[in-house]
Amino acid sequence: MMRRKTHNVFVGDVGVGSDHKVTVQSMTNTDTKNKEATINQIKELEAVGCDIVRIAVPDMEAAIAVEQIKKAINIPLVADIHFDYRLAIECVKNGIDALRINPGNIGSKERVLEVIKACKYHNVPIRIGVNSGSVKKEYLQKYNGVNVDSLVESALEHVRILEENNFYDTVISVKSSDVRLCVESYRKIAKETQYPLHIGVTETGTVFNGTIKSSIGIGSLLLDGIGDTIRVSLTGDPVEEVMVGKQILRATGILNDEVDIISCPTCGRTQIDLISIATEVENRLKSLHKPLKVAVMGCVVNGPGEAKEADYGLAGGKGEGIIFKKGKIVKKVKEESLVDELIETINRDLL
């Protein structure tokens, strides 16, 4: 998988672009003015591996809160701002690491220039965030509604505003709640610019549906080599967003930091309680942060043969099973000892 070559931007001390790892973002759902609640939620996000966090800044009190929030957290902070350019400037003064704005909705060119000047002086990058609900009317008319062309052209117009003022510290997003439209829009803009891309499917819904939509959309783009930072948008706890985002990176082979459990779906040949065994193996290896593949297979058909790429594994028979390593059988044990023997074999080799 060849990753798209991009410019590089630094959000705080985190690099965004093709010379850096693909990062995972989230956004707080607290009232930013409630500094304690916002800081606590960001700490929770840090604990599950969030790389960058965004906060809503709807008013001046929230903008002023940025300074205190920044001092209490360990990951870069992005301000999400609409309409009022003064909020952007205040956030920059208070130490924000990046802004998410649409230059087209914060007023005159003079106001946009004031924001750009502040960002240049403080080395603060700007994310141009366009979604299907914020496409300019002229492009809706020109391209007959919300589609790939109107989304991309709207984003590129905002980019041109920055470029006209010699500002290039830019990240772009073109999100939609329609998965196909979202993917096609990112594919198009990826061909037309070398700016890093923040990818995600917006407004995906609750955790179950949102995870599926996000996995398809974000995963498709990542497998194309497109995407430098991702945000899974879920109606729920932001911690879930980060956990799903990390898992998408693992599933696409971009992140290799944990045990990958391979288990078959079971069928009529299965003669052991594979569901319970697979769950127990997963739970017992959860704290082992090693890039290993561990197979939990229901019968000899799906045993060492089909799972020979696994580093370790077990396969069940009737009341018993086998432990194997790299496709070779190590030992035969009773069903009740399968999990213990597998874990002991892994620990013995790693210690």
Image: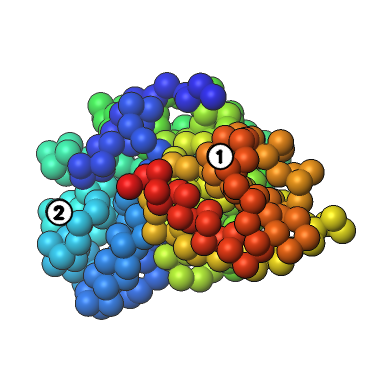
Residue at image position (62%, 40%) is 329
Residue at image position (32%, 67%) is 44
Q: Which mark is residue 275?
A: none
Q: Is residue 204 above or below residue 1?
A: below
Q: Quadrant of residue 222?
A: top right
For label 2, the crowd category at 10 Å Cα-Cα, with few meaning under 14, some 14 to 19 and many 20 or more, is some
- Residue 133: image location, x then y, percent: 57, 54
Name the kind of residue labelled 2 in the image: Gly
Q: Nearer the viewer, residue 253 or 114?
A: 253
Residue at image position (22%, 49%) is 97
Q: Which mark is residue 325?
A: 1
Q: How many marks?
A: 2
Q: Which mark is residue 95?
A: 2
Give the SS element for disc 2: loop
Judge left or right: residue 29 versus residue 119.
Answer: right
Q: Is residue 34 above or below residue 303?
A: below
